Image (cartoon, rainbow, N blue to C red):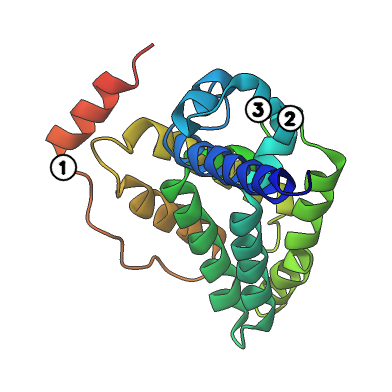
Amino acid sequence: MAGPEPRLREDAARNRDAVLCAARSLFAERGIDVPLEEIARCAGVGIATLYRRFPDRPTLVRAAFEPKMRAYAAAAHAAVQASDPWDGFAGYVRTVCEMQAADAGFADVITLTFPATAELDRELRAATAGINDVVERAKTAGALRPDFVLEDLVVALMANAGVVNATSAHAPDAWQRFVAYQLDAFRTTGPSQLPEPVSPRRLLRAMRRSKP
């Protein structure tokens, strides 16, 4: 009678991994509002199996984005450790915006556009611990405008998420130029060298795609 138990555990682990793999793929492509039934179908399991592993959407989101949260925390740590205050701040902004561009679901997560679990909220706070010090160092160094506040960073990330959502299919690099403009608006010195602009044809395609 003891024989089937390890097999059951193996099946459960395999189902959990399949659900996480499907969730990460679909969240990255379409954001975290993908129907759970579609995730279960993509994973090759029934919806009841999904719910046994992950009783609600926030629990699944938290599990699916665990690796990205580690990378998010690493970006904050790198910013804190940077020797140049502006490089630390600007590098953090670019890294997080690049993560948004690569994963629509992650863009949702860090702007908290869904009911977060208490655990995920704590993880988000821990991942960004020290960013206020990064901001203050850059301001003290005279590189970041003195009226900048952390809420401006949140708005910038929300805006970048909108750009990514509208242009990812036809102009996937558009966010880079947008972020460069944002950083120039934040800094106290002269303008930087901008990335190449989006071609008119690609931008037109993106605009047509984003129409309601």
Circle 1 residues within 10 Å: few <14, some 14–19, many ≥20: few
| Position in image of residue 60 (x %, y %) | 68, 37
Q: Nearer the viewer, residue 47 or 148?
A: 47
The correct choice, above or below, for 159 with respect to 183 in the image is above
Q: Give the position of the C terminus as an image quadrant.
A: top left
CA gap between label 3 and label 2 equals 5 Å
For label 1, the residue is 199
Q: Are marks 2 and 1 in contact (CB under 8 Å)?
A: no
CA gap between label 2 and label 1 equals 48 Å
Nearest to viewer (mark 2 / mark 1): 2
Q: Are marks 3 and 1 in contact (CB under 8 Å)?
A: no
The answer to which of marks 2 and 1 sits earlier in the sequence is 2
Q: Amino acid at mark 3?
A: Thr
Q: Nearer the viewer, residue 3 or 67?
A: 3
Report which quarter residue 29 is drawn in. top left
Q: Are marks 3 and 2 in contact (CB under 8 Å)?
A: yes
Q: Amino acid at mark 1?
A: Ser
Residue 52 - label: 2
**Residue at the limit of the structure toward the left, as seen here:** 201
Query: Residue visible at 71% across and 49% down?
Result: 3
| Position in image of residue 93 (x %, y %) | 55, 60
Circle 3 residues within 10 Å: few <14, some 14–19, many ≥20: some
